[in-house]
Structures are given as C-alpha cells and as structure tokens.
Image (cartoon, helix red, strand yellow):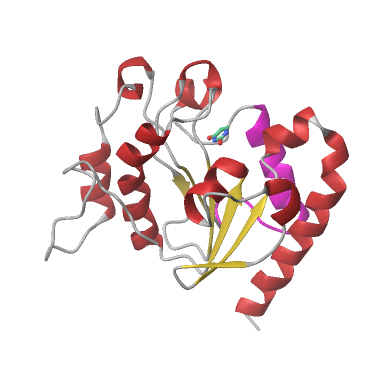
Amino acid sequence: MDWILENGMNEPVAGTPDTWEKLKGDCAGCMNCELGRTRTNLVFGVGNEHADVMFIGEGPGEQEDLQGEPFVGPAGKLLDVMMEIIGLDRSQVYIANIVKCRPPRNRDPLPDEQSACIGWLHRQIALVDPKIFVFLGRIAAMAFIKPDFRITKEHGQWFDVDGRKSMAIYHPSALLRDPSKRPETFVDLKTLQREIKDLHA
Ligand code: URA
C-alpha cells in the first residue's frame, strides 16, 4: 500500500522510534485540514495498544465529537453488541477511524481530508501491529483494500493488506438503517471469530 503523507507532523521522524506518547502529543491539536476548525474534540482512538484485532471506521459522529472517543454513539452501541457476539470487548481490540475529526453533518470524509489524516492512523497501526484488520464500512475498505471496493459484494471476504488478514463488514450505522443486512454480518463475524481462534491455536 502506498501512503501519501502530505503533512510533516503525521509522518514518523526517520530514525527515531515512534511511541504512543509521542504520537498522541503530535496528533493533539492537529489542524492539518479544515475539519480541525469545526471539531469539539479530536477522536484519537481507544483500546488495547497491542491488540491482535484492529477495527477501523470512517470518522467520528456527533457523540464521538462530544466525548472524544470512537464509536460511543448509537453505531458504537451496536458495535459493542457485534463484538460481544464473538466474545470480544473494547479492552481486547483497538478502535480508530480514517479521520480523527467529525465531518460536518456526518458526511463522508473527503479524499483531501483522508490524506491529510491517514498518517496518524498509519502510525497507530505501526504501534499496535495488529494481525487482523476489520474495516467498518465502505469508506475504510476503499481506503485500505482497494478504491473500487464493493461492500455489498465483498464484505466478509479476506484480503491481504500489508501482510495482515483484512476483512470489511457493514458499518454498524448501515445495520441500524437496514436491519435486513444483519444476518450477513452475523456470518462475517463468525468468520472473524474463527480466524481469531486460529491465531491462538
Ligand atoms: N462512525 C464511525 O465510522 N466512527 C465512529 O467513531 C463513529 C461512527
């Protein structure tokens, strides 16, 4: 995967080992794009900093913006249930987003906003070093798996992203809007659960 880091600050300094402390310090107060002007809080990421599984969403919504934590609104409550179905909770995984600040009216993050922000996520991934990526929805899958990713056709399939097992599933917001997609997501979650079991076999 080619990463285009357009901003100095979110690139790790060559030759210096990155740390969580350094990354959080560099990211705090980021104004690399216009979303910095309208946010209440920057939503960095949460969870186990050495998790085997990393969940990646698209960007904070209203509640996340207010609380500074990813997936704490209605979609987050459903994500908790989805994790619980396969025996996971927030203490076992790491959760982050493609963009760290809320896009106005919850619109999709623009390509420029994604490229201004993706370097932070790249540094988080390098520090977590997960074995498995789970992309929540089309936007994250398009950013990491392939630009023409089709969530309706390709959810639940395994892809290789930089040597890590990678799957996209429907975004919990999509499952709230259209509960008829939930059975397919249940199957995808069970596929993920088997893969996680195999890590420890
Ligand atoms: N949707 C996302 O993609 N991320 C969040 O943190 C919340 C809602």
Q: Is residue 182 left or right of residue 154?
A: right
Figure quadrant of residue 157: bottom right
Residue drawn at the location 83% of the way across and 44% of the way down:
182
Residue drawn at the location 62% of the way across and 79% of the way down:
200
Q: Is residue 197 left or right of residue 6?
A: right
* Residue 168 belongs to the span the image colors magenta: no
Residue 47 visible in the shown view: yes
- Give the image quadrant in which the ligand numbered 1 is located: top right
Residue 29 visible in the shown view: no
Secondary structure mostly seen in the magenta stretch: helix
Q: Is residue 57 left or right of residue 12?
A: right
Across and down, in percent, residue 170 comes to: 70, 44
- Please identify the quadrant where the N terminus is shown: bottom left
Across and down, in percent, residue 57 comes to: 54, 42
- 120 or 7: which is nearer to us? 7
- 155 or 66: which is nearer to us? 155
Q: Residue furthest bottom?
A: 201
Figure quadrant of residue 106: top right
- Up the image or down, 29 lies above or below 56; here it is above
- Up the image or down, 163 lies above or below 82; here it is below
- Please identify the quadrant where the C terminus is shown: bottom right
The number of numbered badges drawn on the structure is: 0
- 138 or 29: which is nearer to us? 138
Residue drawn at the location 42% of the way across and 57% of the way down:
49
Across and down, in percent, residue 119 comes to: 31, 48
Residue drawn at the location 83% of the way across and 51% of the way down:
184
Across and down, in percent, residue 96 comes to: 47, 45
- Up the image or down, 99 lies above or below 169; here it is above
Figure quadrant of residue 53: bottom right
Q: What stretch of residues is rendered in magenta?
A: 74-92
